[in-house]
Image (cartoon, rainbow, N blue to C red):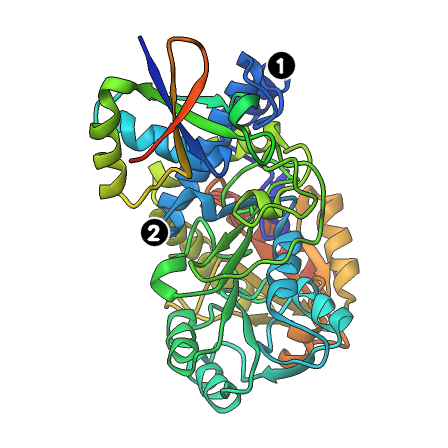
Amino acid sequence: MVYDFLICRSLTYAQRTASALGRAGISAYVTRIPRAISGEGCGYAVKVSQRKRSDALRVLSRVGIAPLRIYALEPSGTYREVTA
Amino acid sequence: MIYLDSAATTLQKPQAVARAAAWAVRACASPGRGSHQPAALAAETAFACRQAVAELLGVGDPERVVFTCNATHALNLAIAALVSPGDPVVISGWEHNAVTRPLYALGAEVRVAAGPLFDADAALDAFDRLVTAEVKCVVCTQCSNVFGMVLPIQAIAGLCRQRGVPLIVDASQSAGALPVDLEGWGAAFVALPGHKGLYGPQGTGLLLCGKEAAVRPVLFGGTGSASLRQEMPDFLPDRLEAGTHNIPGVAGLLEGVRFVAERGPENILAHERRLVALTRDGLTQLPGLEVFGGGLGPEQGSALSFRVHGMDCEAVAAWLGERGVAVRAGLHCAPLAHRTAGTLDTGTVRVSFSAYNSAIEVERFLSIMERMVRKR
C-alpha cells in the first residue's frame, strides 16, 4: 500500500487527527516524521492510504483539523509534497 | 485509620490507579520520543488521559489539557501567563498560598474581594465592585480549602466575561465533585491537582487552557517536537511540557478520572455533602466547639473546619491522630482565608471527605471527639 504523511504540529495533534479518522472508519497511524521531510526537527505525522487522501481531508476539515503539510511517499522511496 | 484529610490528597484510590501506575513503570517509555512500542504505549496513555479530562471538565480539545506536577505548578503557569509586575489582580478572600505567593513574587497589586463566610452574594458583590476594565486578571478558587465554602464561580465568570477580564479558576477542592466547565465559564485557565478529587497519584496536576490563552513557559527543554528551533514550540501542550512526562502518574490519573466519570461527580458531591452535614450536626452538639459549616446547599463543599475553645488546633489534630483519625490543623497554607474568616490567630481543625469515606467513619470520629470534650 502507498501512504501519505499528514504532518502535524505535535504528537497530541497527530493523535487527535488519527482519532478523528479512526472514528470515520479510515485507518490512520501516528508515526514519527521521516527526517527527510521533518523540516523543524522531530515531530509526528499521521500515515493514511493515498487512496483515502480526499476522504481523510474531508473528515478532518469537518472537525476543524488541518495538517501542516501533506507528503506522498513515491514508489522510489522519496517524498513529494502534495496540496490538499 | 479514619482518613479525613482528602482536601490535602485522597489517600484511598480506586485499585485500578495503583495497577495502572505499576503497569506504566514496567511498560511505558517516554511519549513523543520514539516510534517503538513502549513510547507508543506512553503516548496512547497520555492522549487517553487528556481526552478523558477534556470530556469530564469541559475542554474543547485535548491539546489544551496540560500535565503539571500539581495544582501549584498549574497556577504558577497560569499566573505567569497573565500577570506582570505591578499589574492589578483581583482575588477572593479565600485563596491558598499557591495563588497569593506567585502573585507576591511577581509584584502584582493584589486586590481582595472579601466577604463573610458562606455568603456567596457578598462574595459576588465584592467581585462586582473590584473587577474593572483596568484589572489584569481575576484569580478565584471554586471552593475554599479551609472551610469548604463554594464560591459562585459561574456568576464571577460571567462578570469577568462581561468586563473582558481573564479569569483563572483554582479547582483544587472542586474538580471531581463540583461542575468544572472551562469553555462554559469562558475562563482563561483552570488549574487543578490530579491527586485529590480525581483520585490520581501524587505528582500529578493539570492546567486547562482556554482557547485564547497565551501561555508563557517557565520550564524550557526537550518536547520531542520542532527540535531544530531553540524557542519552545508555540503550540500546546508542548509549549508547557518540557522534559520527560510522569507517565506512571498520568496512567494512574487516567484511571482516577474514569472512576469519577463512572460514579458521576454529582453523586460523589452528594455523598460528601451528606458526610459533611452529619459531621456538622454531630460536632455542634458538643460543648465548647465552634463549627464553621454552611448547610446542605450549594455553598457547601466537601470540607469543614472547627475549633475547640481552650485547646490548640494542633493539639486537637495530634490527639485525634493518636486515636487513628487523620485531620489537618493550622492555617492550611491559606492565611488569607483564615484572616477573612477571623481565625488567623487560632487556626482551625479541618475534616475533609472523599468518595471512600462512610457515615460509620463519621460516627466513630464523632464519638472520639465526644471523649475528648468530656475529658477536658
Name the residue located 45 percent from the left edge and 27 percent from the top edge. A45
**From what the image shows, is residue B260 above or below residue B331?**
above
What x and y, as percent, mark residue B355? 46, 43
Q: Quadrant of residue B292?
A: bottom right
Q: Nearer the viewer, residue B23 or B78?
A: B78
What x and y, as percent, mark residue B97? 70, 65
Left or right, A24 with reference to B42? left
Residue B266's disc is: 2
Q: How many marks?
A: 2
The answer to whether any part of residue A81 appears in the image is yes
Q: Nearer the viewer, residue A13 or B171?
A: A13
Q: Nearer the viewer, residue A3 or B308?
A: A3
Left or right, B28 with reference to B323? left
Q: Secondary structure at mark 2?
A: helix
Q: Nearer the viewer, residue B27 or B1?
A: B27
**From what the image shows, is residue B218 above or below residue B105?**
above
Q: Residue under mark 1: which chain is it in? A: B
Q: Are marks 2 and 1 on the same chain?
A: yes
Q: Which residue is mark 1?
A: B26
